[in-house]
Image (cartoon, helix red, strand yellow):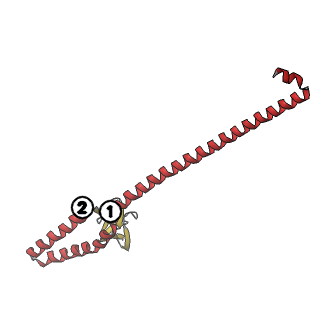
Amino acid sequence: MNTENRDKDPIENETENVVNEVETAEELSVEEQLQEELAKEKDKFLRLFAEFENFKKRTTKERIDLFKTANQEVLQAMLPVLDDFDRAMTQISKSGDETLAKGVELIHEKLKSTLVSKGLEQIEVKAGDSFDGDFAEAISQIPAPSDDLKGKIVDVVEKGYKLGDKIIRFPKVVIGN
């Protein structure tokens, strides 16, 4: 090779060196482009993976919430029946027929225990409690029978219930003003 380089004139050597440098620069440029493309694909993969993990977590949470409230429609449909039972118990206890009252009370307790086993809880609100609009619905205001009942619950018209942590029916109350 030395003999070849000596035989060539200096301009040819210079041209060959420039061509070699250009080829080396092109090879580096192609390698840099490949590195950039690889980095972009890695980034795209990581984002897609993170998005998929978030999707799995979200659907798992939604599924758990669905199982917790799957009975909601059925329980809401049963609430008027439970209210009717409460009213019937009040009237039967006034009639004085203890045998009838005892039989209906057993059925009433069985219904309540079945609903409680499915996750239904009664919201405890009673006369004299402070009114909180987040947990009760005021349907009326009346003059307070006493000064200590101003701004407080005077009467509970309809009981409220919740399923797990979710209120499915707010208690309806009367407030004193």
Instruction: Please state which of residues 74 and 76 is positioned toward the viewer in this rendering.
Output: 74
Residue 117, numbered label: 2
Q: Count of labels shown?
A: 2
Give me the residue at 62% from left, 42% from top. Answer: 38
User: Dot 2, how many residues are within 10 Å of its Cα: few (below 14), some (14-19), or many (20+)?
Assistant: few
Instruction: Please state which of residues 39 and 30 is positioned toward the viewer in this rendering.
Output: 30
Q: Mark 1 points at which residue?
A: 163
Q: Are marks 2 and 1 in contact (CB under 8 Å)?
A: no
Residue 20, image quadrant: top right
Considering the image in quadrants, where does the C terminus appear? bottom left
121 shown above or below 45: below
Question: Looking at the picture, how far across and down is residue 81, in whole percent?
Answer: 25, 74
Q: Which amino acid does label 2 sit on?
A: Ser
Extreme bottom residue here? 95
Question: Looking at the picture, how far across and down is residue 69, in whole percent?
Answer: 35, 63
Q: In this view, does 68 lie to the left or right of 59?
A: left
Question: Looking at the picture, how far across and down is residue 132, in whole percent?
Answer: 38, 63
57 shown above or below 39: below
